[in-house]
Image (cartoon, rainbow, N blue to C red):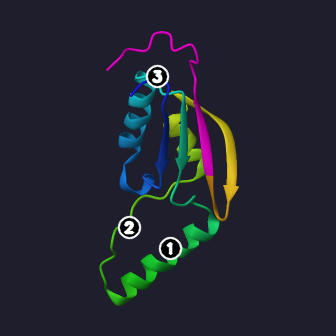
Amino acid sequence: MNENYVIIFPRIDTEFTDKQLTDIFEKCWQIGIKYIFFIPAQLLNYHIFISEIKTIIISLIRREKRVFCGYSRSKSEFIKLWNKYYNLEKEFNVGHGGIFLLKIIDASLKNIKKL
């Protein structure tokens, strides 16, 4: 890979911890990937939060174990994960989620070590 690539991350966010996602963005930055299309599985909002609380309460009442279905984050949480390396260039609103076009912060790629 080199800086001529555009990376598409479709719905990978539920599978990785915050640290792991930050590491992915850092590695992309290190090799000079200029653009990333980041497509979250879902954006955490009030309705999803209430639904999760409801699910937790029901599982406690029924004494059933919950199945971990991945991480859920808000837009502001995603921005915190990539903001050291990428800026949000454009956001496309699609349904209940979004697609984020990220642009590398240091467009000249100075001081980026090659892997």
The location of residue 34, given as percent across then percent down, is: 54, 27
Q: Amino acid at mark 3?
A: Gly
- Asked if the residues shown at circle 3 and circle 2 are in contact, with their CB atoms under 8 angstroms apart, the answer is no
Q: CA distance from mark 3 to mark 2?
A: 32 Å
Above or below for 25 versus 42: above
Query: What's drawn in magenta, residue-wise?
Result: 99-115
Above or below for 108 versus 81: above
Classify 10 Å Cα crowding around label 1: few (below 14), some (14-19), many (20 and above).
Answer: few
Residue farthest along the top direction in this orientation: 111
Q: Residue drawn at (37%, 40%), measured in percent from left and top?
A: 19
Residue 110 in magenta stretch: yes
Q: Amino acid at mark 2?
A: Cys
Residue farthest along the bottom direction in this orientation: 62
Q: Which residue is mark 3?
A: 32
The location of residue 17, given as percent across then percent down, is: 37, 48
Q: Residue drawn at (47%, 47%), measured in percent from left and top?
A: 9
The location of residue 14, given as percent across then percent down, is: 42, 57
Give me the disc on residue 53.
1
Above or below for 109 versus 80: above
Classify 10 Å Cα crowding around label 2: few (below 14), some (14-19), many (20 and above).
Answer: few
Give me the disc on residue 31.
none
- Asked if the residues shown at circle 1 and circle 3 are in contact, with their CB atoms under 8 angstroms apart, the answer is no
Say which of 66 and 96 sits in front.
96
The location of residue 90, given as percent across then percent down, is: 69, 40
Snapshot quadrant of residue 104: top right
The quadrant in which the C terminus is found is top left
Foreground label between 1 and 3: 3
- Which label's residue is closer to the chain start, 1 or 3? 3
Is 113 left or right of 109, judged from the image as shown? Answer: left
Q: CA distance from mark 1 to mark 2?
A: 14 Å
Classify 10 Å Cα crowding around label 3: few (below 14), some (14-19), many (20 and above).
Answer: many
